[in-house]
Image (cartoon, grey):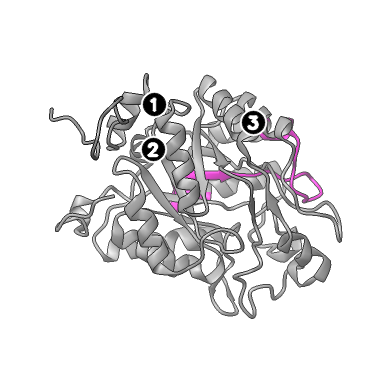
Amino acid sequence: MHFLDDSLLPENQQKLVIQVAPYGPQWLPGDFPEDIPVSFAEQVQKAVDCYNAGATVLHVHCREPDGKGSKRLSVFNEMLERLRTAVPKMVLQVGGSISFAPEGEGAEAKWLSDDTRHMLADLQPKPDQVTIAINTNQMNVTELLMEGDCDGTSLTNPAYFAAYRDMQIEAGPKFYLEHLKRLQANSIQPHFMLAHIAQLETVERLIRRGIYKGPLILNYVGIGGGASGTHPADLLEFARRTPDGAVLTIEGIMRSVIPMNMIAIALGLHVRVGIEDNIWRRKGERMTSVQQIEQMVRLAREVGRDVASGPEARDIYQIGVQYNSTEETLAKLGMVPNREPGQRGFPVRAAA
């Protein structure tokens, strides 16, 4: 992304899209009972409350009646049908792992099989987006936790903590090549969850080779433990390397979420909040998903940046858009064309 002299002025920035992840599949209901919805009615009402507070993208996970994270596609189908009615203007984004919560004490926290995740492309009603990881990677979500971050939660259980410490993202080429094919065939937008620049480079190669043809909607995943951390220079370099036509949201973990999102708002990028990422306002003070959204709205308004409505978020995300060719995709994303046979020097975009 290129930052011109006036790029930090809020009137020149896209309206802020607030993505919320309010279901927190890693938590047990007793970890935060006042903000972990369990029944269908409670889960849907949480979406309504988040939308009314200012969030326009909903990261969807589901729970079973006993409070455990659901891995059943039928539950996701019912949830999506209810959400389409309750929050029709929200972008519905299904978490591509479905749920990585361990089933019992000492069990592994692991992503589901490729075959099961591929079935997300067949959900009915279909979601607007499914998140997709690129390249198998460690996902130790405990590495950046600070003293007090686990207080009052199931993560104080050593076996449960170890399950998340040792978690892996399974997302090699065998998975993502087929998954992208299925999502595009069903007009579901992939939302790329990228842990560092090497994964961004893989996505760029998929575009240049004609494997992915569509808008580039990204999360920079700054959660440590195999992903990027919280160093601002890494965030800035990732933003600099992101194609001009992409949409970039910043994702952090626990109390780093707020300062990372402050940087995102200043840069004209977008933010993600919710109890899946963070449960604290400050050390020892809990914060609900709705309160986190309200905080982002206040911060944006304080610096003069507008917050996107539901229809505006859909336009910014380019929901429903696909491109017809590699050349069109490169042009729409502001990327230079592929090298022609025998061409020397750096490729440049042709003049209009």
Lateral position of residue 282 relative to residue 214, left or right: right
Q: Is residue 68 magenta?
A: yes
Q: Residue at x 75, y 59 (%)?
A: 28
Question: Could you tell me which secondary element the residue under label 3 belongs to?
Answer: helix
Residue 208: x and y in percent read 40, 31
Circle 2 packing at 10 Å, graded few (<14), some (14-19), many (20+), is: many
User: Cα distance, mark 2 to mark 3?
Assistant: 20 Å
Residue 241: x and y in percent read 35, 51
* Picture quadrant of residue 330: top left
In this view, the residue in front, 111 or 54, is 111
Q: Is residue 272 above or below residue 284?
A: above
User: Cα distance, mark 1 to mark 2?
Assistant: 9 Å
Which quarter shows the C terminus?
top left
Q: Which residue is mark 3?
A: 120
Lateral position of residue 81 relative to residue 306, left or right: right
Circle 1 packing at 10 Å, graded few (<14), some (14-19), many (20+), is: few
Q: Residue at x 39, y 48 (%)?
A: 248
Q: Which residue is mark 1?
A: 321
The answer to the question of whether label 1 and label 2 lie on touching residues, with beta carbons closer than 8 A, is no
Q: What segment carries the magenta color?
A: 49-77
Which amino acid lies under the numbered mark 2 shown in the image of this protein?
Answer: Tyr
Q: Which residue is mark 2?
A: 317
In this view, the residue in front, 284 or 35, is 284
Lateral position of residue 327 relative to residue 57, left or right: left
Q: Is residue 291 above or below residue 18?
A: below
Which amino acid lies under the numbered mark 1 shown in the image of this protein?
Answer: Val
Residue 4: x and y in percent read 17, 54
**Which of marks 3 and 2 precedes in the sequence?**
3
Inspect this view and state whether residue 259 appears. Answer: yes
* Picture quadrant of residue 205: top left
Lateral position of residue 34 relative to residue 332, left or right: right
